[in-house]
Image: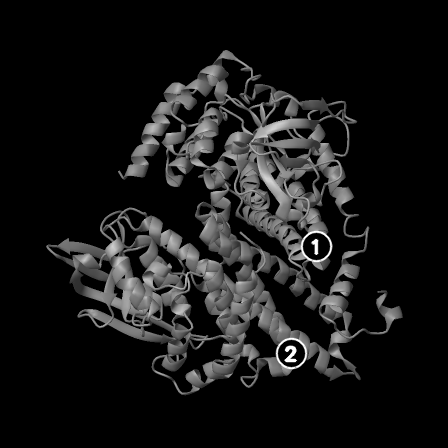
C-alpha cells in the first residue's frame, strides 16, 4: 500500500499523458459536442486505448488483463480527467469489469472478461431510478419464468446507456423498494426486444440515457452470480466506481487549477499581473491545500481497493465526498478568476465546470457520502 | 418480515432477557471491564453481562465465528449496536485488541496469528496496548529508534515506548520497531507483538501534573521476541500502521461517551451531549459539521503519511508546506465544534456546575485561537504557498508583509 506512485505507475502516467494530449485534447470533446456525434466518443480513440491495455487494466492476467490493479486504473483515470476524455473507460473498464469480477461466476468471468479486455464488449450499469443516487431504491423487477428472466422497469442517468453493447441492469426478485434483499444484476443486450433507450444530452456533452425495460426476456444465465444475491457485489462495484471517478475528478481539478494559476500570471490589470494581488493569491493557495488533501485521499482509496477491501466503504465515501467539494471549488474559482472570458464557450474552462457538475452527481453527492461515512462510524 | 428485521426482534428479546439492569446505567471509568490477566470485574453483574455476550461472540460481533467472533454481517452488527444503544447497554468488554489490533490481524495476520490471538481477545483473556511514540519520536513517528535485531529464530528488542496508556495493567503490546536502520526511515519499520511477561520488559508509570498516572513508559532491554510475532511483512509495519488509522477513527466512535479521557473529542462528545434518533445525531446541521470535520481529519492524517512516503521516495510535493495551515485551522474547527456540541455546558469559565472536562474544553477553545497565529499565521502560510508552490508574482513587499 503506497501513497506515492511507483516507477511503473509513473511510467504509465507519463505515457498516458503523452498519448491523451496528442489524441484526445479537450478540443476533441468540443468536436464531439458540436458535430452531435451519435456515439459520443471516438471509436478510433477507444481502439487505441484498448491496445494500450486500458480496457483490461484492473483485470487479472488469467482473463487477458494487464493486472495493474486499481491504482493503475487510477493513474489513467486522472489523465483522462485532465483532458475530459469521453470514452467507455469508466462505464466498462472500471464499473462493468468490476461488476463481472465481483458478481460473476467463474464461467461468466471466463466468457466476459477477455471480451472486455479485447474491446469487443462495452457495458453500462443501469442503476438509478430517480434523480438522486440511491442504490437500494430499486423498483425494477426481474422474474424467473422457466429458463428465462423477465425484466420490467425504468432507469435513468445510465452512463453510456445509449452506446454500450450490454446493460447491467440492477433489479430485484424480492424485497421492499429500499432493501438490499433480492437485488440482482442481469445482463441485457441493448438491442433486446422490449428495451427502449432515450439518449439524454447532459451538461458535460458526455453519454447518458434513460432506459426502459418492458417485458424484456433474457436467458437465466444472464444473471451475474446468483439471482437475488448481488447487493454486496453491487455495493463493492459502486465503491470501486466512486474511487475511479474520484481519481478522474482529481485529474480535472489539477488541470483546471493549473490553467487558472497560469492565467493569474499572464493577465495584466492596473499594470501588474493579477496573480500579484493577495486577495487572489490566498484563494489560489487555499485550493492548493485542498488539492493536497484530495491527492492523499485518492491515493489511499485506490490502494484500498486492491489491498484492504474491508475498509473500502469508508475510503470510497471519503474520496467521493472530498472530491465533490474540491471539484466544485476549483471549477467555480477557475471561472471567477478568469473573469469575463471564463464564462465564454470559447475558453475550455466551461467544459471543466460542466463535467464537474455531472461527476458530482454520479454514484452519490456530498450529502450521500457524508451520511454514509457518519453511519459507518456509528453517528 | 425480512431476515434483518427478524434478527432485530430476536436480538432485542435476547438483550432484554440477558442484560442486567445495572448494566444499562451510564458508565464511569470505574465501571469498565478491560479484561486481561490482571483484569477484575467491577461488579458481579458486569461479569455476568460480559460472559453472556462473550458466549455469543458478541464482544466482537462482526469477527468470523472461526476466531470466536459473532460472525454477524455489517448490517446485523449495526442492528446489534442500535439495539444495545436503545437500552443503553454497556460495552461488555473494553479492548484495544477488539478495536485496533484485531482488525489489523484480520487484514494482515497469518492464520496462525489469528488462531492464537483473536479468540483470546474476544474472550477478554489478554489485554493489549499500543506502542508507537518514543521519547524522541512524537509527530515524526517514522524516526522511531526501538530496535529489533534479527537473531535467526527471534528478534532482540531494545528501546522504549512512551505514552503507553495503561501499560501497567496490560498483557501484550503491539508496537512499531526498527528492523532495518540502513534504509529510508519508514521502509525499515515492522509491526511486532510482544508479551509483557517476557524477560527484559518493564513499565514505569508517568505522573502527570494532575496527579494521575494513566500513561506509562515501557522499556525493552534485550527482549527476545519469537519471529512468529511479526505482523505483516518484515519492514512492512508502516502499511499496517496506516491501516490502523482507519480503525483509530472508528474507535473514537465506538468507545463513545464511556471513554476515560483527558481531552474531549468531537465524536465521543457528540455521543454524550447530543440526542440520537435511529442511530444518527438528530441535529442534522451538527451531524454534518461533525462528519465534515472527521473526514477532514482523516484526509489530514493520510497526508501526513504521504509526506513521509514522498520524502523517502525522493519525491517532492507541496504537501509539507500546507500542513501547518491545514492542521491548525482544523484544530480551531474542532473546538468550535466541541462548543457547539456542548451547548451551554461548554460555556462554564470556572467553579461549580460544570465538569472539569467541560471547563477544560472552553479554556482549550480559547487556547486554540493561538494556533493559527503562532509559528507563522495562516495568512503567512498562504503567502508562502502562493510564492513557493504556485510561484505567483510578488507584489510590493511592504504592503504584503511577507
State the image quarter where residue B367 is shown: top right
For the residue pair B88 and B75, the one nearer the viewer reads as: B75
Where is residue B167 drawn, in percent x and y?
A: 64, 25
CA separation, marks 2 and 1?
A: 28 Å
Q: Residues within 10 Å of mark 1 (few under 14, many from 20)?
A: some
Where is residue B95 drawn, in percent x and y?
A: 54, 28
For the residue pair A33 and A244, the one nearer the viewer reads as: A244
**Chain identity of mark 2:** A
**Chain identity of mark 1:** B
Q: Vertically, is A166 above or below A180?
A: below
Q: Any mark on residue A338, and which?
A: 2
**Which residue is situated farthest in the bottom direction here?**
A35
Of the two numbered discs 2 and 1 in the rendering, the one whose residue sits closer to the viewer: 1
Q: Label 2: state its secondary structure.
A: helix
Q: Any mark on residue B323, and which?
A: 1
**Which residue is situated farthest in the right direction here?**
B398
Amino acid at each position: 500500500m503506497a501513497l506515492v506512485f511507483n516507477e511503473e505507475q509513473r511510467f504509465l502516467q507519463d505515457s498516458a499523458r503523452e498519448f491523451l494530449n496528442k489524441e484526445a485534447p479537450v478540443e476533441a470533446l468540443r468536436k464531439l459536442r458540436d458535430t452531435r456525434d451519435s456515439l459520443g466518443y471516438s471509436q478510433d480513440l477507444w481502439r487505441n486505448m484498448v491496445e494500450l491495455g486500458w480496457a483490461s487494466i484492473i483485470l487479472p492476467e488469467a482473463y487477458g488483463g494487464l493486472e495493474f490493479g486499481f491504482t493503475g486504473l487510477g493513474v489513467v483515470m486522472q489523465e483522462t480527467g485532465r483532458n475530459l476524455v469521453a470514452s467507455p473507460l469508466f462505464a466498462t473498464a472500471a464499473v462493468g469489469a468490476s461488476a463481472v469480477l465481483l458478481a460473476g461466476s467463474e464461467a461468466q468471468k471466463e466468457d466476459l472478461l477477455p471480451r472486455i479486455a479485447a474491446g469487443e464488449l462495452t457495458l453500462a450499469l443501469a442503476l438509478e431510478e430517480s434523480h438522486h443516487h440511491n442504490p437500494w431504491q430499486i423498483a425494477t423487477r426481474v422474474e424467473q419464468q422457466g429458463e428465462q428472466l423477465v425484466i420490467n422497469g425504468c432507469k435513468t442517468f445510465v452512463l453510456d446507456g445509449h452506446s454500450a453493447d450490454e446493460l447491467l441492469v440492477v433489479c430485484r426478485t424480492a424485497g421492499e423498494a429500499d432493501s438490499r434483499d433480492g437485488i440482482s444484476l442481469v445482463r441485457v443486450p441493448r438491442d433486446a426486444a422490449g428495451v427502449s433507450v432515450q439518449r439524454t444530452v447532459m451538461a458535460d456533452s458526455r453519454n447518458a440515457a434513460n432506459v426502459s425495460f418492458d417485458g424484456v426476456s433474457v436467458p437465466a444465465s444472464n444473471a451475474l452470480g446468483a439471482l437475488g444475491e448481488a447487493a454486496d457485489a453491487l455495493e463493492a462495484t459502486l465503491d470501486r466506481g466512486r474511487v475511479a471517478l474520484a481519481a478522474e475528478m482529481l485529474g480535472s481539478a489539477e488541470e483546471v487549477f493549473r490553467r487558472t494559476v497560469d492565467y493569474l500570471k499572464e493577465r495584466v490589470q492596473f499594470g501588474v499581473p493579477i496573480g500579484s494581488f493577495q486577495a487572489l493569491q490566498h484563494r489560489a493557495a487555499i485550493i492548493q491545500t485542498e488539492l493536497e488533501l484530495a491527492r492523499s485521499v485518492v491515493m489511499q482509496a485506490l490502494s484500498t481497493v486492491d489491498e484492504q477491501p474491508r475498509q473500502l466503504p469508508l475510503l470510497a465515501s471519503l474520496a467521493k465526498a472530498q472530491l465533490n467539494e474540491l471539484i466544485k471549488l476549483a471549477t467555480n474559482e477557475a471561472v471567477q478568476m478568469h473573469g469575463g472570458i471564463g464564462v465564454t464557450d470559447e475558453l475550455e474552462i466551461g467544459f471543466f465546470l460542466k463535467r464537474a457538475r455531472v461527476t458530482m452527481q454520479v454514484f452519490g453527492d456530498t450529502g450521500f457520502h457524508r451520511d454514509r461515512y457518519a453511519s459507518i462510524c456509528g453517528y | 418480515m425480512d431476515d434483518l428485521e427478524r434478527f432485530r426482534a430476536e436480538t432485542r428479546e435476547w438483550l432484554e432477557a440477558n442484560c442486567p439492569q445495572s448494566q444499562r446505567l451510564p458508565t464511569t471509568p470505574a465501571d469498565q471491564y478491560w479484561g486481561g490477566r490482571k483484569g477484575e470485574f467491577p461488579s458481579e453483574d458486569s461479569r455476568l453481562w460480559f460472559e453472556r455476550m462473550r458466549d455469543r461472540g458478541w464482544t466482537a460481533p462482526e469477527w468470523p465465528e472461526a476466531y470466536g467472533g459473532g460472525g454477524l454481517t455489517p448490517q446485523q452488527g449495526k442492528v446489534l449496536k442500535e439495539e444495545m444503544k436503545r437500552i443503553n447497554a454497556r460495552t461488555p468488554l473494553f479492548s484495544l485488541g477488539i478495536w485496533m489490533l484485531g482488525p489489523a490481524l484480520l487484514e494482515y495476520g497469518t492464520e496462525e496469528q489469528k488462531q492464537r490471538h483473536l479468540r483470546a481477545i474476544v474472550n477478554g483473556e489478554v489485554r493489549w496496548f499500543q506502542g508507537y511514540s518514543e521519547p524522541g519520536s512524537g509527530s515524526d513517528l517514522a524516526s522511531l529508534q526501538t530496535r529489533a535485531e534479527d537473531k535467526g529464530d527471534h528478534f532482540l528488542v531494545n528501546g522504549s515506548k512512551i505514552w503507553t496508556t495503561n501499560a501497567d495493567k496490560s498483557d501484550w503490546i503491539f508496537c512499531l520497531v526498527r528492523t532495518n536502520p540502513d534504509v529510508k526511515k519508514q521502509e525499515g519499520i515492522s509491526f511486532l507483538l510482544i508479551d509483557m511477561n517476557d524477560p527484559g520488559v518493564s513499565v514505569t508509570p508517568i505522573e502527570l501534573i494532575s496527579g494521575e498516572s494513566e500513561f506509562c513508559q515501557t522499556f525493552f532491554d534485550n527482549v527476545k521476541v519469537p519471529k512468529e510475532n511479526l505482523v505483516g511483512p518484515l519492514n512492512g509495519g508502516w502499511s499496517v500502521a496506516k491501516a490502523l488509522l482507519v480503525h483509530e477513527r472508528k474507535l473514537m466512535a465506538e468507545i463513545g461517551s464511556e471513554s476515560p479521557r483527558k481531552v474531549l473529542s468531537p465524536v465521543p462528545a457528540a455521543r454524550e451531549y447530543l440526542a440520537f434518533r435511529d442511530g444518527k445525531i438528530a441535529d442534522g446541521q451538527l451531524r454534518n459539521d461533525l462528519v465534515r470535520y472527521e473526514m477532514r481529519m482523516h484526509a489530514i492524517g493520510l497526508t501526513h503519511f504521504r509526506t513521509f512516503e514522498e520524502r523517502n521516495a525522493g519525491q517532492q510535493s507541496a504537501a509539507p508546506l500546507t500542513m501547518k495551515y491545514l492542521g491548525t485551522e482544523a484544530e480551531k474547527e474542532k473546538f468550535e465544534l466541541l462548543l457547539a456540541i456542548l451547548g451551554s455546558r461548554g460555556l462554564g469559565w470556572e467553579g461549580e456546575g460544570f465538569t472539569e472536562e467541560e471547563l477544560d474544553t472552553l479554556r482549550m477553545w480559547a487556547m486554540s485561537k493561538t494556533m493559527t497565529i503562532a509559528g507563522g499565521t495562516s495568512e503567512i502560510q498562504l503567502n508562502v504557498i502562493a510564492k513557493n508552490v504556485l510561484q505567483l508574482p510578488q507584489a510590493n513587499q511592504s504592503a504584503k508583509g511577507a
